[in-house]
Image (tube, grey):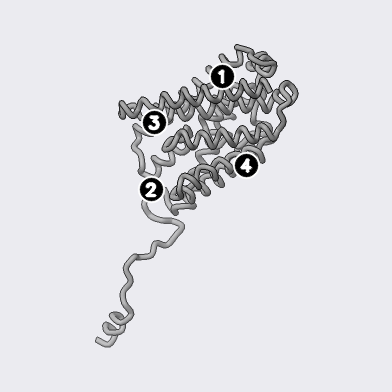
């Protein structure tokens, strides 16, 4: 239990740090992109610790798979509650750009902040592991430079897996976006936990380019281009397809609805039509 207590303390420290950074844009609105940095930092830093429990916690700390799944769900739920309006996900930032909800410069700043937050989270996690507070973290510190990649299948199969998961996730999320946060946040947390669990033997279904960068890009086994194809290109492809299926078009690229017929709001009364025919 000492390992679990140390992990909980780490989660609280990360959440507190992210909360302090998120408070800065309230005083200086021009630095709104810091909210995305904080959201990405919290998500990646905490997910790295969950990944540690998955890799070595079962035989170094006696923590089973039920604990890791529960902790991942709690992490995603807490992230959704503490980071409203921000995602820490470059795919969602690009989606807002394609929907004409954000300009090019704010989108570029948000994406850059998300990747910066992921990199800072990786550095913070490595420093935390170097403290070797428990046996679990001592082992993780020894193997941190030779971590296990999350991509356990060939590139083509990994691309297909991430793309399919991203397509399903974004379609469901788009249908939930007008729902109350009390319903939307828990459902999205459950959905992300489910995808991560069923794809754990394939790609882990990150569906988040900055999250994948922080968790697996530094691990040996594949080249940077292969990781980018699986975790970046596939995520953007799935998001774009979901947006096209949901809206029928991509507002930033073309205005014509290609999939759905748009009915006019005003109907001509039947009586008027019959009178015109008689005349």
- Earlier sequence position, callout 4 versus callout 1: 1
Gap in angstroms between the C-alphas marked 4 and 2: 31 Å
Q: Which residue is found at the position 45% from the left and 34% from the top?
A: 83
Q: CA distance from mark 1 to mark 2?
A: 39 Å
Secondary structure under the numbered disc 2 in the rendered image: loop
Q: Name the residue tied to disc 3.
A: 108
How far across and down, in percent of the image, does residue 41 sit?
49, 25
**Residue behind mark 1:** 125
Q: From what the image shows, is residue 261 above or below residue 224?
A: below
> Quarter holding the N terminus?
top right
Element assignment for label 4: helix
Q: Give x and y (percent) for residue 10.
A: 56, 22
Pointer 1 and pointer 3: residues touching (CB < 8 Å)? no
Check contact, mark 4 vs mark 2: CB within 8 A. Answer: no
Q: Which residue is mark 2?
A: 251
Marked residue nearer the N-terminal end (4 or 2)? 4
Residues marked 4 and 1 touching at CB (< 8 Å): no
The quadrant the C terminus occupies is bottom left
State the CA–CA distance, disc 3 to disc 4: 30 Å
- Check disc 4: other Cα within 10 Å, few if <14, some if 14-19, many if 20+: some
Residue 9, percent from left and from top: 57, 22
Nearer to the camera, 156 or 49: 49
In the rendered structure, find residue 194 and report the number of the disc placed on it.
4
């Amino acid at each position: 239990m000492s390992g679990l207590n140390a992990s909980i303390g780490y989660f609280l420290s990360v959440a507190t740090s992210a909360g302090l950074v998120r408070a800065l844009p309230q005083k200086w609105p021009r630095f709104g992109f810091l909210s995305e940095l904080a959201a990405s930092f919290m998500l990646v830093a905490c997910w790295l610790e969950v990944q540690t429990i998955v890799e070595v916690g079962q035989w170094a700390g006696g923590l089973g798979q039920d604990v890791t799944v529960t902790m991942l769900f709690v992490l995603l739920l807490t992230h959704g509650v503490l980071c409203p309006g921000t995602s820490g996900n470059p795919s969602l930032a690009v989606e807002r750009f394609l929907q004409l909800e954000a300009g090019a410069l704010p989108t570029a700043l948000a994406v850059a902040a998300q990747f910066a937050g992921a990199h800072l989270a990786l550095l913070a996690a490595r420093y935390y592991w170097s403290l070797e507070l428990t046996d679990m973290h001592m082992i993780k510190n020894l193997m941190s430079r030779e971590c296990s990649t999350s991509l356990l299948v060939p590139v083509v199969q990994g691309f297909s897996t991430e793309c399919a998961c991203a397509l399903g996730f974004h379609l469901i999320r788009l249908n939930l976006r007008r729902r109350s946060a009390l319903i939307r946040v828990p459902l999205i947390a459950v959905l992300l936990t489910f995808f991560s669990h069923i794809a754990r033997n394939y790609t882990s279904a990150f569906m988040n380019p900055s999250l994948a960068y922080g968790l697996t890009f530094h691990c040996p086994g594949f080249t940077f281009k292969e990781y980018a194809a699986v975790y970046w290109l596939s995520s953007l492809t799935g998001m774009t397809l979901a947006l096209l299926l949901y809206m029928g078009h991509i507002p930033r690229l073309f205005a014509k609805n290609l999939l759905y017929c748009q009915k006019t709001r005003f109907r001509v009364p039947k009586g008027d039509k019959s009178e015109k025919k008689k005349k």
